[in-house]
Image (cartoon, grey):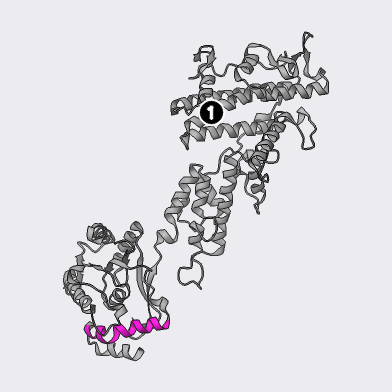
Amino acid sequence: MTDRTLEYWEEKPGYWCYIDELLGEELKAAKNDNPRRLQGVGRPVHTLALTVGESFEPLLQTICVLRPQRIILILNQRYGNKKGKEYGHDLSQLILYLVGNPNLPEEFRPQLSKKDIQIRELPADSPTQVFRTLLEEFQKSEAQPPAGYTNVVDITGAKKSMIAGAFFYAAHSGLPITYVDFDKYDPDWRRPYGYTCKIGQIANPYEAFHLRDWEQVRRLYESYSFRNALAMLGKDETSGIRGAMAWKIDDTAGEPLFEKSDRDKVTVVARLFEMYEAWENGDYALAKQMRDSFNPRLPDDVVPWSIDELGDIWPSVALTVTANQAALELLNKHLALKQGLSKQGSSSPADSLFAQPKRLLAYVRDELAKIERLIEKNEDYRSAYLRAAALEEFLLKARLCISWLNNSLDIEIGNNPPVTVFTLSQTDQIDGFKNLVEHSGADSMRNTLARGSRLNLKQAGMKVRLGSNAPSLHPYWSGTTLDIDVVQHGSTPCFTKLRGEAIHTHLYLPRSIAEAALELVRAAVDEFERNWLEHFHPGILANTQNKVIAAPAWPRLCEVCELTFLPPRLRS
């Protein structure tokens, strides 16, 4: 084949002779050497767009291997002394000469007619004009592939500007890109030996690097949809972005597209997404386990404060098999956390979440931030309202509980005179605190805190009210949109009544009402922190300034995970 090729070059008999005497032999030799040399695109081709350069041989090889039903010839304005259309006409005659040519093996003979070949001369030799021309041609009804077929863009041999435009269009449309490469070149003739050709699909950059998918991952991450972002990355190196990064672009026996070090970085991203997913769902225990599994340790600024503060104490039923067992176990553990029950079953209010100011504050701030995200990022206004109302009630209970724990409640038992908490027996302290923790009813707790009324703990046989050394509740709701003293339904605050209706019916709540609830609960959190938590634990606010309550910004995540293989615009 080498001798025959050299003879053809030396004699220069023209393309007709090339088709009759050399083309078929080249393709047979390439196939016999390795069938993968002529692998094509794996599907039959409907329309093949060819960007035409100075040499026709590789284009004729491509047509014989892909055997398209239609061809679009994309031509520059001039080729030497010939206009582009004339040059395209010459090539189209050669293409038609391939049809039914007995010198070609049957498997390489295309089935085309004159009407199947479109000649397009570019109005200007620029990537933009190539893109626009391909866009126009592939939008035509006759270019739409039947079921099971695909269209293809070939970039063999054309000028760089033409290749760039064709690449842009293929990346935009998701079409396969083909290219003819050669293993052997003659240094004297500066030409490749055709029988060493390799004709197949090369990577579409957007598909190979999953750039669109990375853009989607960024959007999902920024909207706190960590589960969906994780799905885009893939479970392992057989799917998603991780699978694409492990793809061996040249040959199944070759090296993956990305180095293992870069692929490992994406594994770290996936693990981070899993941690953030557990945290956002309130599974602080699982999030803490994941946080502790990183080696080297994650920087503190990419780990929400609540994970470190709550992870070691938060209820988890990850190892519980059945749903009914999990429900009971979760309830018991949650009550134990608030009441101060140890794993051994002993009870001490001093071990309650309400007795641990940093952890309590971490939970409150984390919950408030999640309510804000439900509105801003998820647009889930009903859930935001319900969680805002729940947090406001939790803070009412927290005020009473920390007052109990700091001996700042007066206790009435029967008709006896009021006593302080610490004068009660240990049993009565435990029983009374347990009943206070289990008490429900925001309005009754608010009345006790704001109006001095007694809170009836029936199960414990006690009534409690604020002692003289307790703070007084500032009416944080005053002047807010859902002012509890003004906006009422009968004698019940609208804020409370609407929460009950939203719980028991699928009630639509618009953004404005969710934002009004957020306004109220922000005021409640601020009053709780400044007037109650700081009162009983001086310095707590100064010691917990600037704590992390959100996932890091995308650029910081890329920096920590060293995603330097991503284009700068995808890391910004």
Name the quadrant containing residue 169. Answer: bottom left
Name the main secondary structure of what is drawn in magenta. helix
Give whichever of 458, 240 is nearer the camera.
458
Q: Which residue is at a point 46% across and 35% down the rendered structure image?
A: 379
Q: Could you tell whether 453 is left or right of 257 in the image?
A: right
Which quadrant of the rendered structure holds the N terminus? Answer: bottom left
Q: Which residue is at a point 51% across and 67% down the rendered structure image?
A: 256
Kindly identify the amino acid type of the residue bearing the numbered disc 1. Leu
Looking at the rendered structure, the secondary structure element under dot 1 is helix
Give whichever of 528, 511 is nearer the camera.
511
**Whether residue 186 is visible:** no
Q: Is residue 116 magenta?
A: no
Name the quadrant containing residue 84. Answer: bottom left
Give whichever of 130, 428 is nearer the camera.
428
Q: Crowding at label 1, few (<14), some or many (≥20) Cα neighbours within 10 Å?
A: many
Give whichever of 557, 91 is nearer the camera.
91
Position of residue 422 measured from the top left corner of the image (x, y, whole percent)? 80, 20
Q: Is residue 30 magenta?
A: yes
Q: Which residue is at a point 50% across and 22% down the rendered structure image?
A: 498
Instruction: Count up the numbered dots.
Output: 1
* Residue identified by numbered label 1: 386
Up the image or down, 290 lies above or below 405; here it is: below
Q: Which residue is at a point 21% across and 62% down the rendered structure image?
A: 124
Range of residues picked out in magenta? 16-33
Name the quadrant containing residue 543. Answer: top right
Position of residue 533 measured from the top left corner of the image (x, y, whole percent)? 67, 25
Up the image or down, 259 lies above or below 180; here it is: above
**Whether residue 280 is visible:** yes
Position of residue 310 measured from the top left corner of the image (x, y, whole percent)? 67, 38
Up the image or down, 47 lies above or below 334; here it is: below
